[in-house]
Image (tube, helix red, strand yellow):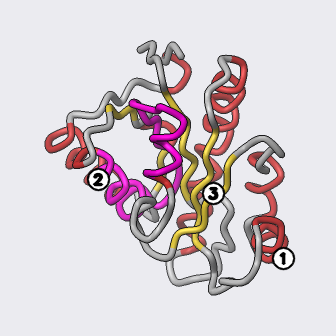
Amino acid sequence: MSQKNSALVIIDMINTFDFQGGEELYENTLKIVGNIHELKKKAKKKGLPIIYVNDNYGLWQDNMNDIIEHCKKKKGETVIEILHPDTDDYFIIKPKHSCFFGTQLDILLHQLDVKHLILTGIAGDICVLYTANDAYMREYELSIPKDCMASETDEDNESALRIIKKTIDADMTLSNQMTL
C-alpha cells in the first residue's frame, strides 16, 4: 500500500524487558526487530518521518539518551543496537499505554501533515492496540504490519490482531510487501 503523508511509529522498542512477562516479550521481540529495522530503512529512503514513542521508566527529567542508556543496561541492549533512533528521528516519551495519551504526538503529526500511520512495536496487545484505537478515533489511516508487532504470547498477539482487524480495519500487509 502506497501512502502519501505517512509516518512510521515505533512503539516501546527501547525497553528494559525487566518486568513480569518481560522474558517472553523479549523473545517475541527478537522475532520482529529485523522486520521493523528493514521497514525503517524503506521509510527513511522515502523521506517519511520516523517517530519513536516510548515508556519513560520513571525518568521524567531525563532525555532520550538517558532512557536509551538505562534500557541498554538491562536486557534491551540487543534490540536497541538494531533499532537505535537516528539523530533525525523524533522521540516522544509516553506516560501510559497509548502513544496519544499525555503526549504531543497528535500535535506533531498535524504539523508534519501526517494522515497515515504505520504502527510497529510492542506490546501488541496493550500499547500498539491502544494506540491503534486512539489513532482510529482521531481518523488516521492505519497500517499495522503483523510481522512488526509482538506481545508476551502469540495468543495475546493474535487476539490483538483480530481486534484491530475487526474494529479498526487497519491494513495488516506484511512489512516486506508494503509499498511506501
Element assignment for label 2: helix
Residue at the outermost left position: 166
Please give the residue where the numbered disc 1 appears in the rendered image.
73
Dot 1: element: loop
Q: Which amino acid type is shown beneath numbered disc 2?
A: Ala
Q: Is residue 173 left or right of 34 when viewed as pictured?
A: left
- Asked if the magenta segment contains residue 124, the reply would be yes
Magenta stretch prevailing secondary structure: helix
State the SS at label 3: loop
Could you say which disc has been placed on residue 178 in the image? none
- Determine whether 70 is above or below 68 in the image: below
Q: Amino acid at mark 3?
A: Met
Within-10-Å neighbours for mark 1: few <14, some 14–19, many 20+: few
Instruction: Give the side of residue 30 with respect to residue 140, left or right.
Output: right
The residue under label 1 is which amino acid type? Answer: Lys
Q: Residue at coordinates 62% horizontally, 34% vertically from top-left?
A: 49
Q: Which residues are magenta?
A: 106-135
Q: Nearer the viewer, residue 59 or 176?
A: 59
The residue that label 3 is drawn on is 13
